Image: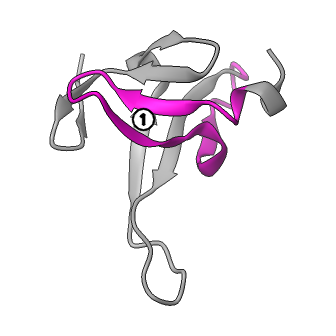
Amino acid sequence: MRWSEFCDKELIDIAGGERIGTVGQADLVIDLQTGKIDSLILPVGTSWFGRKQGDRPIAWRHIKKIGPEMVIVETEGKGRMKER
């Protein structure tokens, strides 16, 4: 899959069924030793002046399914990613 196809997909939290953003909004964290994607970092909220108010990390292992229009992410709820 090309990045241009992947970045348009919506991120959906399977626990609450809510949209948490799009892949294109996220920054990638790449493991320099393996070259694999470690996680996505989503910006959370913006202030009146367009500044980010925080980040929401999504570990790659929490991505459960990549479909034609969305990416399903497993969380524990309340914005916290499930630990394994």
Image quarter of the C terminus: top left
Specify the quadrant that holds the N terminus.
top right
Q: Residue type at mark 1?
A: Ile
Q: Residue at x 44, y 74 (%)?
A: 46
Q: Residues within 10 Å of mark 1 (few under 14, many from 20)?
A: many
Q: How is the image coloured?
A: one colour
Q: Look at the image and give the residue range highlighted in magenta.
A: 6-35
Queried whether the magenta region covers residue 15, the answer comes back as yes
Residue drawn at x 62%, y 30% is 9
User: Where is residue 43 drawn, in percent x and y?
Assistant: 48, 58
- Residue 15 lies, in percent from the top left, at 21, 24
Q: Secondary structure at mark 1?
A: strand
**21 falls in the magenta region:** yes
Residue at screen point 41% across, 43% down: 57
For this view, does 35 lie left or right of residue 70? right
In this rendering, the answer to whether 12 lies above or below 63 is below
Q: Which quarter of the picture shows residue 83?
A: top left
Percent coordinates x, y for residue 42 in the rendering: 49, 49
Q: Is residue 28 left or right of residue 81?
A: right
Q: Nearer the viewer, residue 71 or 27?
A: 71
Q: Nearer the viewer, residue 51 or 69?
A: 69
The answer to whether residue 42 is above or below residue 81 is below
**Residue 37, picture quadrant:** top right
Outermost residue, bottom direction? 49
All told, the count of numbered labels is 1
Above or below residue 58? Residue 61 is: above
> Which residue is the site of mark 1?
58
**Residue shown at 21%/30% (left/top)?**
16
Q: Residue 33: x percent and y percent? A: 69, 24
Report whether 21 appears left or right of 81. Answer: right
